[in-house]
Image (cartoon, rainbow, N blue to C red):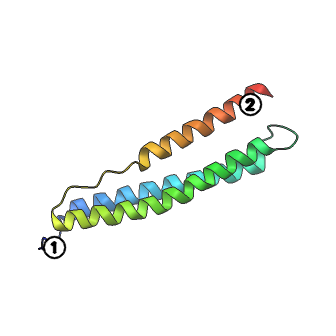
């Protein structure tokens, strides 16, 4: 037997929406950073480091966009049924990806 759904407090619904929008802003920053890396970073004659950074950041942006929507849906469903909020690794993965890309950029900048 499933738990009946109830309308959650609007403050929690709006907080969930703000979190979703924050993830979308983060994904837009990843897109912009990735495209800027490909366009403007000059880390060598072949430009492959800039391309790698760009591909990783744009891929992180795509994953963040998809993960944000999924997280918003799961949080909304949990609030409606009174269940616990699901655990997500999205912030950890996103933070680690951005840190690794930053280190790669730093290493290539110092190496140059």
Q: Position of residue 26 (x, y in %)?
A: 50, 52
SS at circle 2: helix
Mark 2 → mark 1, Cα distance in angstroms: 54 Å
Q: Residues within 10 Å of mark 1 (few under 14, many from 20)?
A: few
Q: Residue at x 75, y 41 (%)?
A: 49
Residue 29 position, x and y percent, is 57, 52
Instruction: Count neighbours of disc 2 (C-alpha within 10 A) and say few if under 14, some if 14 to 19, many if 20 or more.
Output: few
Expressed as whole percent of the image width and height from the top left, the position of residue 43 reads: 79, 37
**Quarter of image, res 3:** bottom left
Question: Of label 2 and label 1, which has the lower sequence position?
Answer: 1
* Element under disc 1: loop
**Residue corresponding to mark 1:** 5
Give the residue drawn at x 17%, y 71%. Answer: 7
Of 98 and 13, which appears nearest the observer? 98
Q: Is residue 41 above or below residue 71?
A: above
* Residue highlighted by disc 2: 109
Q: Position of residue 48 (x, y in %)?
A: 79, 44
- The answer to the question of whether label 2 and label 1 lie on touching residues, with beta carbons closer than 8 A, is no
| Front label number (2 vs 1) | 1
């Amino acid at each position: 037997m499933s738990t009946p759904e109830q309308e959650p407090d609007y403050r929690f619904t709006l907080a969930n929406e703000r979190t979703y929008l924050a993830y979308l802003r983060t994904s837009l920053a990843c897109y912009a950073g990735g495209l800027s890396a490909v366009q403007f970073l000059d880390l060598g004659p072949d430009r492959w480091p800039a391309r790698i950074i760009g591909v990783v950041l744009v891929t992180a942006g795509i994953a963040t966009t998809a993960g944000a929507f999924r997280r918003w849906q799961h949080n909304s469903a949990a609030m409606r049924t009174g269940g616990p909020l699901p655990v997500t690794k999205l912030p950890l993965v996103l933070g680690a990806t951005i840190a690794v890309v930053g280190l790669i950029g730093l290493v290539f900048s110092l190496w140059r």
